[in-house]
Image: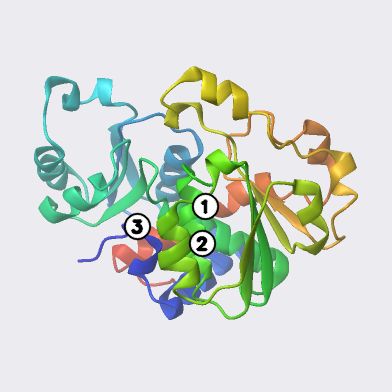
Amino acid sequence: MRHLLNPLDFTVEEIDELLAVADDIEKDPSRYAHVCDGKKLATCFYEPSTRTRLSFESAMLNLGGSVLGFSSADSSSAAKGESIADTIRVISCYADICAMRHPKEGSALVASLHSGIPVINAGDGGHQHPTQTLTDLLTIHSLKGRLDHLTVGLCGDLKFGRTVHSLINALVRYPDVKFVLISPPELRVPEYIREDVLRANHIEFKELGNLDEALPELDILYMTRVQRERFFNEEDYIRLKDCYILTPKKMKLAREDMFVLHPLPRVNEISVEVDKDPRAAYFKQAQYGVYVRMALIMKLLEVKQPC
């Protein structure tokens, strides 16, 4: 039995195989409509989610399986003080696989140590978000045709953004990937990402405070929102939330083959006028999330591709 707790749980070869299955699902989803008949997915979400929870549920339903679970801590026995360890032991009696989101870092790891079924980390605090990373990798590969020889700009909240941390960890394993890290000083990537991931792997990167300066050299621009829920005080959030806003005027500085990604939800960091630009790929990215989660569920349940 395997779990997915962070993007490095799979080898590059396994990720490439997973993306190939997701690509095949996109081409003919009807072939996969019954591969998980009789299987149940538990979605244990201790904090709010729209895309991640619904895309997991959509993925399992598309595979012919069924879904059960809860969408907030208040609607689970966590409100009564039940531990994650006890919850996952019970869930293991009811379902075949579990997707868990929790505000505390390391919660998915704790669950995996006590689980009788595969556990998928659907986001743990500001730590990891591996299925968003798989979504991002599939999106980039589908749009650019490769995951190597890319210059990737990451913009906004790089300190608390778990999607950013996970994506960096995943992309450093591919050849000749460079990063441009665009943020205010208060929201720069954590020191462990800078030292233990980027410098330790001899990855070329630079940190900028200006989005306009970065745009002309990028193959991918990955925008993020400044997350109110990760701040300790409202004043800091208000001061920083509008630091970087992508507009059609700024998009004129970018290459014709650069694509804009965003894990969503967006607040105002991407102007709605940018949605009309063919390089805006964030809603397509949400669709890719369903395909890659379908492939992941199949892999962890050891379900074979249909003939």
In the rendered image, which residue does mark 3 sit on? Answer: 36
Of residue 271 and residue 141, the one placed in the foreground of this image is 271
Mark positioned earlier in the residue sequence (2 or 3): 3
Q: Position of residue 68 (x, y in %)?
A: 29, 37
Three-letter amino acid code at the position of disc 2: Ile
Seen at 39% across and 76% down, the residue is 11
Secondary structure under the numbered disc 1 in the rendered image: helix
Could you tell me if residue 250 is visible in this image?
Answer: yes
Mark positioned earlier in the residue sequence (3 or 1): 3
Seen at 25% across and 48% down, the residue is 106
> Badge 1: how crowded within 10 Å, few (<14), some, or many (20+)?
many
Cα distance in 3D space between marks 3 and 1:
31 Å
Q: Residue 94 appears in which quarter of the rendering?
A: top left
Q: Which mark is residue 164?
A: 1
Cα distance in 3D space between marks 1 and 2:
6 Å
In the rendered structure, are the residues bearing label 2 and label 3 in contact, judged by CB atoms less than 8 Å apart? no
Nearer to us: label 3 or label 1: 1
Q: Is residue 300 above or below residue 117?
A: below
Seen at 58% across and 39% down, the residue is 264
Q: Which mark is residue 168?
A: 2
> Badge 2: how crowded within 10 Å, few (<14), some, or many (20+)?
many
In the rendered structure, are the residues bearing label 1 and label 2 in contact, judged by CB atoms less than 8 Å apart? yes
Three-letter amino acid code at the position of disc 3: Cys
Q: Residue 183 appears in which quarter of the rendering?
A: top right
Three-letter amino acid code at the position of disc 1: Val
